Amino acid sequence: MNFPIGELSKRSGVKVPTIRFYEQIGLLPEPPRTESNQRRYGKPEADRLIFIRHSRELGFEVEDIKALLAMTSEPQASCHQADSIARSHLSEIDRRIASLQALKGELTRMIEECGHGRICDCRIIEALADHGHCASDHSRA
Amino acid sequence: MNFPIGELSKRSGVKVPTIRFYEQIGLLPEPPRTESNQRRYGKPEADRLIFIRHSRELGFEVEDIKALLAMTSEPQASCHQADSIARSHLSEIDRRIASLQALKGELTRMIEECGHGRICDCRIIEALADHGHCASDHSRA
DNA sequence: CTAATCCCTCTAGTCGCTAGAGCATCAAGA
DNA sequence: TCTTGATGCTCTAGCGACTAGAGGGATTAG
């Protein structure tokens, strides 16, 4: 119940330098220190860090996570905002999936058409050089 | 056939600062300058830049693009390397799509379960706090 | 001639970490 | 008690691929 940063790292699955970085950007509060200036943590910090890790793994940005964390300290408030953050994140993910699938189609077509001969006949190189060949309108993943 | 950077930008669809950045990192050669130190370009540079833009839009990294560009200057060589770059890029995209789809499933489930009540009952917050609720093993997009 | 638009270089910021230098501290065995 | 190795600390810089802005010079249309 009063452990150093390495132990917190093991419990949370977040690397030590990353924990210090999270403290620096205000995602984790500054913990108490020992006389020799070492950080000491307890279970609440570990829980918070696990929350942060899951949120990051699900692709939430740091600002979103700050908002989600702020909510957990007001348990009686409406969870409308959490819902809205999650929904807008979901639509962003949908957008990215669609975009990647378009790229995949384009790339697959290029690779299939490649005759494995010389550069000057290569459909991959040609497709990259001339957008007229493109089937889809890939304009930013 | 001897135009300034703004015109190159229009022809290629790449922003002016980005063109200068590409020159800096060696993706574009240093062009000749006018007496008053302004860059002047021709059609080959525009073609090269369009090639770069398409490659970036398809998600190729700068190092890959350098390799692809180097190939275009050896038209008699085998296109095996181009094929291999494209294939490994494709498998990376497959990986990212799979990962994003796992996240999407997780998020969708979280949002569906949210009862739109108070924070303390919110399934979104709860799911983020406790990984035991997770269906899939989402470990890095 | 003037005003708007273009062009130049240089620095610093974005995001979410990661790596490394250079040092202090701690725990465990000989 | 000494030593060794792991762990802790701070600080700075780097990643990738740009983007933004400051502070100036050049060009061009009216």
Image (spheres, coloured by chain):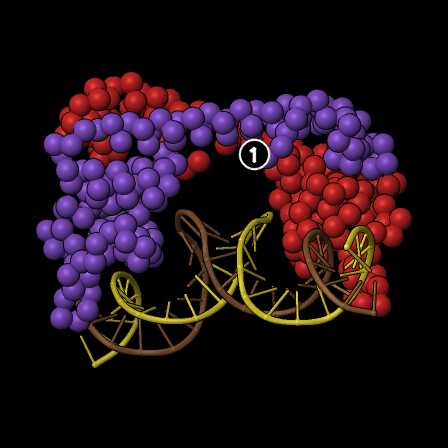
Chain colours: A red, B purple, C yellow, D brown
Q: Quadrant of residue A33?
A: bottom right
The residue under label 1 is: B141
Task: Establish if C20 lies above or below B50.
Answer: below
Residue at 35% across, 26% down: B87
Residue at 86% across, 41% down: A75
Q: Nearer the viewer, residue A36 or A120?
A: A36
> Could one spot residue B18 in this view of the protein?
yes
> Could one spot residue A89 in this view of the protein?
no
- Badge 1 marks a residue whose secondary structure is loop
Task: Establish if A96 lies above or below B43.
Answer: above
Q: Nearer the viewer, residue A69 or A107?
A: A107
Q: How many marks?
A: 1
- Residue B99 pos. (x, y %): 56, 28
Residue at 29% across, 24% down: A110
- Residue A58 pos. (x, y %): 64, 34
Residue at 28% across, 27% down: B83
Residue A91 placement, left or right of B55: right
Instruction: Tell me the crowding category of disc 1: few under 14, some 14 to 19, or many 20 or more residues within 10 angstroms, Cα based.
Output: some
- Residue A49 pos. (x, y %): 75, 45
Q: Nearer the viewer, residue A128 or C19?
A: C19
- Residue B136 pos. (x, y %): 67, 23
**Quadrant of the image containing the C terminus of chain A:** top left
Q: Quadrant of residue B70?
A: top left
* Type of the residue with mark 1: Ala
Parent chain of label 1:
B
